[in-house]
Image (tube, rainbow, N blue to C red):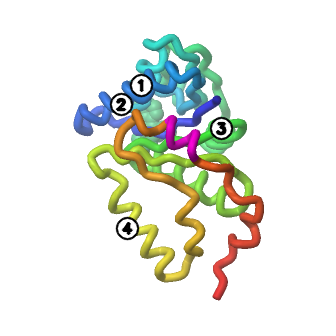
Amino acid sequence: MRICVYCASSQECDPHYHEVAFRLGSLLAEGGCSVVYGGGSAGSMGAVANGALSAGGEVIGILPKFMADLEWGHPGLTRLELVEDMRERKHRLLTGSDAVIALPGGCGTLEELFEALTLKRLGLYFNPIILLNTRGFYTPLQSFMEDVIGQRFMNHEHLGMWSLVDAPEEVLPTIQATPRWREDARTIAVVRR
Ligand code: AMP
């Protein structure tokens, strides 16, 4: 499986987030998965890559050229693919992935996560989206999304588009247990009475 991982570049968050990212990377590699991520060397991005590489896994980074010029790229990846801009990077990360995992992160991670959710709602992406809820990071987002649905900006069925898991050990079993998203995604995309 090719797994797309969205995660933070911050070096200043609690180091526990980096430890969990490293563990996730090794678990994915041990599970025979390729990791596709943003290609950075900082923060949880670097940690997830290092975890997978340390377990002998394949890690593909997709990095905009301007970030490569800033030397933000990870130097030791299996493959670092340079792209023109952030839009192309997001497209290349998601396209062809068998699942998405979002780790705690900032606006970059959240933007990537919300793009994947939006495409799933519209029947343009059908694979599992897993939120790694380290230290309850995504619990407020879950409540927020329940309110979004409660206020009828989305349908109740859309709650099924993503899953929260507490620990990296739960990620692969949850991906395996998650069925492909409904073929009638477009018929439930519009909020109905
Ligand atoms: P965030 O969750 O806001 O840290 O977003 C992660 C995204 O931040 C990455 O996908 C990059 O687009 C961007 N980014 C910001 N700083 C860096 C950095 N030093 N190295 C690599 N990517 C970075």
Task: Provide residue 114's location: percent of width, then percent of height.
Answer: 54, 56
Q: The residue tagged with tag 3: helix, strand or loop? A: loop
Where is residue 79, by image quadrant? top right
Pick the quarter of the image with the C terminus. bottom right
Secondary structure type for disc 2 = helix
Ligand 1 within 8 Å of disc 2? The answer is yes
On screen, 39 above or below 120? above
Tag 1 or tag 3, which sits nearer the N-term?
1
Residue at point 55%, 73% (across, down):
156
- Residue at (45, 25) in percent of width and height: 27
Q: Nearer the viewer, mark 4 or mark 2?
A: 4
Residue 116: give x, y in percent of width and height.
60, 51
Determine which residue is flagged by label 1: 46
Q: Amino acid at mark 3?
A: Asp
The residue where tag 3 is placed is 98
Relative depth, front residue between 104 and 70: 104
Compared with 23, 154 (above or below) is: below
- Report the Cα–Cα distance between label 2 and label 3: 24 Å
* Residue 69 showing in the rendered view: no
Element assignment for label 1: helix
Find disc 2 in the rendering and name its residue: 43
Q: Main secondary structure of the magenta part?
A: helix
